[in-house]
Image (cartoon, grey):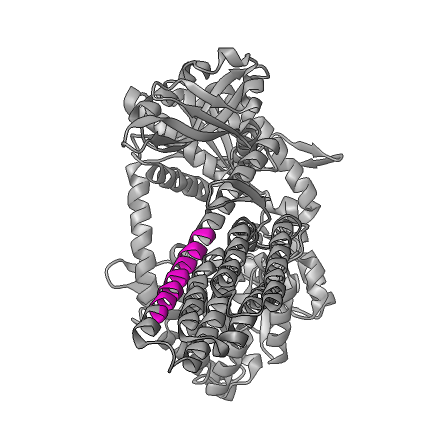
Amino acid sequence: MISARLPDGAALGVSSADDKSGSSPLRDVQLISRAQLAPFFCAANIVASLLVAASLHAALDLATMAGWILAVGGVNLAAMFVARRQAVTHIGRSGRRVPTWVMIGEVGARAAVWLSLPVYSFSGLTGPDQVILASIMAGLGIGGLGLVVVPTAATVWLASFTAALSYSLIIARNAVPFEHMLSILFTLGVAVIGVMTVSRWAFHQLKTNADVGSANESAGLLLQEYEKRGVGWLWQSDEDNRVAYLSSRMVALLGKPSNAIIGHSLPSLLGGRAELGKVLLEKNSFTNLEMEVDTSRGKRWISMAGDPIIDTAGRFVGYRGVGSDITEVRAQQERLTHLANMDVLSGLPNRGRVRQLLGEALREATTSNVPCAIMFLDLDGFKPVNDTFGHPKGDAVLQAVAKRLCDEVGDRGHVGRMGGDEFAIILNDGQSRNNVEHLAERIVASIAEPYMIDQIEIRIGVSIGCAFGPIDGATVDDLILKADLALYEAKGAGRGCVKYFSSELQSEQEDRVRLESDLRNAVTANQFHLLYQPLVSAKDQKLVGFEALIRWNHPTRGLVPPPVFIPIAEENGLMMQIGEWVIEEACRTLAKWPEPITVAVNVSPKQIVMPALPNIVSQALARHRLPGNRLELEVTEGVFLGDNGPTLDVMKRLRQLGVGIALDDFGTGYSSIGYLNKAVFHKLKIDGSFVREAGTREENVAIIQSIVQLAKSFRMNVTAEGVETAEDFERMRDLGVDTIQGYLFGRPLSYERASQMVESYAHRKAS
C-alpha cells in the first residue's frame, strides 16, 4: 500500500499504480473525493427540484410534479449511497475498478431524470414561468462542482444542461425577453467555465497529492524494509550532534539502553571518532565514512553517510543519514586484496605486490639514507624439468624453491614470485654490500641442492642480478630495470652466477639497444655478406660444396661477429627477415656455380618453426631455377625444445622440396636420437670439439664411431667440423666420416675466392 492525501488533508492508504487489480492511487482518490462530494451534489439536485415545484406549482400538474420530485430524489439518493459504497469497496489492492463509463452513465441518468420535466413542460409555460425555470436550470449547472473530481462526468453534466437549456430557449425565443435570455445564458456560461476550471484544478491537485503520497509512502516502506532486512540502519542528530534517532539494530549492536543513546553525543557514542566529529562540524553532506567501533560483538567496522537538515528559515538543525555494518565486506575485501597480491602456486607476493613492496622500501631508503636492495632470480635448467617430468613436478620444484628462499631471507626482507621460474627478493637494509653478497651466495648454494620429488632427484641452479636503491635507481621502474640488466649479465655468464649492476652494464645495455636499432636497418642497407667455407669429400678430397656463413659489416663498428648479433636478432624477431636474405643470397650464388656444388645455410630454431619457411625456400629455388638438392639447411638440436609437431611438419615440407636438412653440432645439445627416424635429416655434423680432442681422448673416438654407425643405420651422411690437421683428417676418414670441413681445407672465403675454387674444381674435373 502507498499513501495519498485527500483535499481535506486526511491520509488514505491506496495501492500502487501498477496493481494488477487495475486500481491506481489517482482513481482511488477520485472515488473517495467523489463520495465526499456526493451529498452536496445530491442535495443540489433535490433542492433545485423543490425550488421548481415551489415556483411553478400553479402552472404544472401536481401529480406529475410529485412523481418527478420523487424520481429525482430517489435517483440522487441511490447514486449517493452507491458512490459512498464504492469509496469503500472499490479501492485498494482488493477493490474492483469502477469503469469510467459507469460514472458517466450515472451522471447522464441523473441529468436526464432532472431535465425530463423542465424540457417536457417548458413549451406550455408562460413567459415569466419560462424565465424562472430556465434560471433554475442554469443555476443547477453550477451543481457540477460536485463532480469536479471526475472531469469527464462534470463535462457530461454541463453538456446535458447546456443542450436542454439551449433547446428550451429556442422554443421560448418569442416569449422570453432578450435581456432575460442574456442573463440566463450568462449564468450558464459562468457555471460552465467555473465548473470546468475548478474541475481541471481539482484533478491536478488530486493527481499531485496521489503522486507525492505514493512517493512518500514508498520511501517510508523502503526505509522500513531497509531496516527490517538488515541492510543498514538509520540515524538522526540535532544541531549539537546529539542523537535524535537511532535504529534499533544499531542500538542492539552498541549494547546500550536507549536512555544512554538518545540525547548523547553521536561521535562520543561511537567511540570518540575524530573523523566523524570533523565532518559533522563541517555541516556538509558526506558518504562512505568508515570507522571501527567497539560494540557488544567486539570490534566492528561501520560505514556512515549523512545530509544536513535545513529548516524553512535556512538554519542548520541537525543531520539525517544511514549507516551499515561493513565488517564482513571489509574482511572479504582484505581476502580479495590478499589473493590479488599473492601468487597462488608459491604463496609468495606476486609481481604487482613485489612492485608495491619495492616502492615502500625505496621510499624508506630515501628518507633514512639506508639503501635497499632488489634481487632478481632466474632458475637455471628449469625448463627441461617441465619438459621431462611434467608440470606437476615442476610446480613442486617451484614450491620447494620458494620455501628455501624464504628460509634464507628470513625477516631481512620479502620474497616474491615474478612469474614462471623468476623470483625476486627485496631487502630493506642493503647498506652492507658484504651481507647482501653472502646472502646471494647462500641462495645459490641452497637452490643448487638436489630436490627429491616423488623419489626423483632433480637438480637446478639459479642466476641472480642485484641492484641497490636509490643508488642504482631512484624509481621502482628504474631499479627493476637495473636489477634485470644485472640478471641478464648473470645469465650470460653461466649457471650459478651473481652479478651486480654497474655503470658498465648500463653502457652495455645502451650499446645493445643501439645495435638492435642498427640491426633492423642492416638488411635494407645491404650491410650483410656471406662467406663460404669449403666442404670436401673424405674419400677423394674433392670439393662437394660450401657452408654459407653470414657476416655483418657495420658502417662504424666494423665487422660484428654472428655470436653478437644473432642472439639479438632472435630475441627481437629479426631472424626471419635475415634468414630469408641468407637463403636468397645462397641461391643466387648457387645459380652461378655448376652442379653438383651445394651450399648449406644455418637456420635458427625460431626460424625453422615458421610455417612460411618452406614457401620462402621454394620461391627462392624457383627464381634461380635450382633443384632442391643443391641447398642444405643446417639446424641445431635446440629445435627439439618445446612442441615438436610444428617443427617436424616444416622439416617434412622442406624435404618434399628436395632440400637437405643437416643436424648440426650433433651430440652437444639435447638428446635427439628419437627424431632421427622421422625421415627429415639427411646428414649429421659432428661438432669440432669432438674432432680436436679425438687424438688425445679415446672416449671421443668411441663417441664419433658411435655417431657414424648411428648415421649409417639411418642412411645419413656424416660431416666432421673443425678438421685442422692431417692427423684429424685421416682419423675422421678412417672412422667412416663422409665429408670434411675445417681450416685444413680452407677458411671461410669471400664469394670471389670461393668462385675461384669452384672454377679450379671444374677444370680438374673436366681434365
Q: Nearer the viewer, residue 484 or 106?
A: 106
| Residue 711 drawn in magenta | no
Rendered location of residue 706, percent (x, y): 70, 57
Which corner quadrant holds the N terminus? top right
| Residue 195 drawn in magenta | yes
The magenta segment is: 184-206
Rendered location of residue 8, percent (x, y): 46, 42
On screen, residue 92 versus residue 759, left or right, reads right
Vertical relation: 102 (above or below) 282: below
Instruction: Locate residue 609: give its quadrant.
Output: bottom right
Residue 621 visible: yes
Rendered location of residue 737, percent (x, y): 63, 65
Vertical relation: 731 (above or below) 466: below
On screen, residue 451 versus residue 10, left or right, reads right
Q: Name the residue located 61 percent from the left edge and 32 percent from the top edge.
A: 228
Furthest residue in direction right, as rendered: 455
Instruction: Locate residue 485: give its quadrant.
Output: top left
Furthest residue in direction left, as rendered: 556
Residue 369 visible: no
Furthest residue in direction front, as rendered: 58
On screen, residue 60 versus residue 521, left or right, reads right
Predominant SS along the magenta part? helix
Q: Nearer the viewer, residue 482 or 700?
A: 482
Rendered location of residue 556, percent (x, y): 23, 60
Q: Nearer the viewer, residue 438 or 471?
A: 471
Vertical relation: 610 (above or below) 445: below
Q: Tell me how many marks there are.
A: 0
Q: Nearer the viewer, residue 660 or 520?
A: 520
On screen, residue 568 versus residue 225, left or right, reads left
